[in-house]
Image (tube, rainbow, N blue to C red):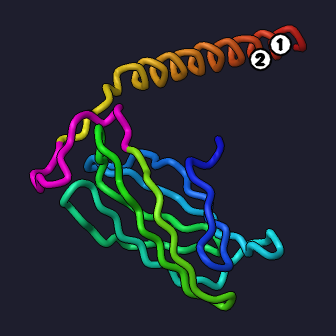
């Protein structure tokens, strides 16, 4: 899957990727940071991220692993986030701003509403059926193997 945004932030190239779903109607977005001059990973970078949607503004916690950055935001669907990223590392400083969209599959949300949102629970009935069928198959196979072995022992005597 390609990046939703590619841009420059000073000496860094920033690739921003769409969010994937987290509990509580949040999305986990990702960034990949590269050294613009070499194209290699930029992994000694401190990252600060804030975002706005309409009049609502939030600062989020960025988790940095080498040159990959993860940051959670509430799902803004049907709106978008305007994400502001500030970078400070051994290559220098940089800033970049880009839009990121929400995910329609999570249902409506409001970035102004702090009421907890219920997350859909998936029915585990299909899993229970698969487990029961697997156990029954194993029991039948075990009984068959026992009967075959017993019959083989009788014919050898």
Q: Residue at horizontal 18%, vertical 59%?
A: 55
Residue furthest right in the image = 156
Within 10 Å of the Cα at label 2, are there few (<14), some (14-19), or many (20+) other Cα atoms? few
Q: CA distance from mark 1 to mark 2?
A: 5 Å
- Secondary structure predominantly adopted by residues drawn in magenta: loop
Q: Which residue is mark 2?
A: 149
Foreground of the two, 114 or 95: 95
Instruction: Look at the image and give the residue range highlighted in magenta.
Output: 102-117
**Quarter of the rendering containing residue 146:** top right
The reply to whether callout 1 and callout 2 are in contact (CB within 8 Å) is yes
Which element type, helix, strand or loop, lies under badge 1? helix
Task: Find residue 66 and report its image quarter.
Answer: bottom right
Reply above or below: 139 against 15. above
**Does the segment drawn in magenta span residue 111?**
yes
**How many numbered circles does the render carry?**
2
Viewer-side residue, 59 vs 143 = 59
Q: Residue at x 90, y 13 (%)?
A: 156
């Amino acid at each position: 899957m390609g990046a939703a945004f590619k841009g420059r932030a000073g000496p860094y190239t920033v690739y921003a990727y769409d969010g994937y779903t987290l509990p509580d109607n949040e999305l986990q977005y990702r960034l990949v940071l590269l050294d613009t001059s070499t194209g290699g990973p930029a992994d000694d970078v401190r990252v600060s991220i804030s975002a706005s949607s309409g009049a609502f503004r939030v600062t989020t916690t960025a988790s940095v692993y080498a040159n990959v950055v993860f940051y959670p935001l509430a799902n803004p669907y049907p709106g978008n986030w305007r994400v502001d990223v500030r970078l400070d590392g051994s290559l220098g400083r940089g800033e970049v701003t880009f839009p990121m969209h929400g995910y329609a599959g999570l249902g409506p949300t409001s970035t102004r509403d702090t009421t907890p949102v219920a997350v859909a629970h998936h029915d585990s009935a299909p899993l229970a059926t698969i487990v029961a069928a697997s156990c029954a198959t194993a029991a039948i196979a075990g009984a068959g193997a026992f009967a075959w072995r017993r019959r083989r022992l009788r014919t050898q005597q």
